C-alpha cells in the first residue's frame, strides 16, 4: 500500500515579507532622524510585527526565515539610512505594513461575521 506523506512547505512568503518589514521598521527607527515620537512609533510597530510573525497563533512558525529576512531588511534600511535615501523607502514600508494588517484585520472580522 502506497502511503502519501505530506510535509509543510519549507518557506512561507508572508513570513518572509513580515520579517523584512519588521527589520526595516526597527532599523529605520534607530538610524533615521525623524524625531523621537516617530522613531518610537516605528520601533514599536516594528517590534509588534516581528513578535506577531515569530509567535503565530493560526499558522506554522518559520523562525529561521523570519530572522534572516528581518536581518536582510535591516541591512537594506541601514544602507539607505546611511546614504540619506531612506525617507521614501520608509514611507512605502509603513504603507505596506498598514495595508498588510488592514487586510489581516478585515479577513478576521469577515470570518467572525459569517
Image (tube, helix red, strand yellow):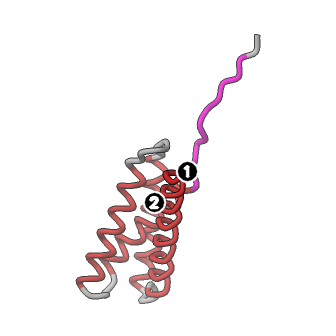
Outermost residue, right side: 1
- Examine the rendered structure and indicate whether residue 76 appears above or below residue 113: below
Q: Which mark is residue 19?
A: 2
Q: Is residue 36 left or right of residue 8?
A: left
Residue at horizontal 61%, vertical 32%? Answer: 7
- Image location of residue 63, percent across then percent down: 43, 47
C-alpha distance separating marks 1 and 2: 31 Å
- Image location of residue 78, percent across then percent down: 40, 76
Magenta residues?
3-13
- Examine the rendered structure and indicate whether residue 43 appears above or below residue 70: below
Dot 2 falls on a residue whose secondary structure is helix
Dot 1 falls on a residue whose secondary structure is loop
Q: Between disc 1 and disc 2, whose residue precedes?
A: 2
Residue at horizontal 26%, vertical 76%? Answer: 40
Outermost residue, front side: 114
Asked if residue 33 lies in the magenta stretch, the reply is: no
**Residue identifier under label 1:** 114
- Image location of residue 112, percent across then percent down: 49, 51
- Examine the rendered structure and indicate whether residue 66 appears above or below residue 41: above
Choose between 27 and 34: the one closer to the eye: 34
Residue at horizontal 71%, vertical 17%? Answer: 3
Q: Is residue 6 left or right of residue 109?
A: right
- Of marks 1 and 2, the one in the foreground: 1
- Image location of residue 55, percent across then percent down: 38, 48
Amino acid at each position: 500500500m502506497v502511503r502519501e506523506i505530506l510535509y509543510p512547505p519549507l518557506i512561507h512568503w508572508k513570513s518572509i515579507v513580515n520579517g523584512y518589514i519588521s527589520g526595516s521598521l526597527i532599523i529605520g527607527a534607530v538610524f533615521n532622524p525623524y524625531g523621537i515620537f516617530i522613531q518610537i512609533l516605528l520601533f514599536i510597530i516594528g517590534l509588534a510585527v516581528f513578535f506577531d510573525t515569530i509567535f503565530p497563533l493560526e499558522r506554522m512558525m518559520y523562525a529561521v526565515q523570519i530572522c534572516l529576512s528581518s536581518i536582510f531588511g535591516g541591512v537594506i534600511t541601514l544602507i539607505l539610512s546611511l546614504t540619506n535615501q531612506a525617507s521614501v523607502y520608509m514611507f512605502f514600508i509603513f504603507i505596506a505594513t498598514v495595508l498588510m494588517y488592514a487586510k489581516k484585520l478585515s479577513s478576521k472580522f469577515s470570518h467572525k461575521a459569517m
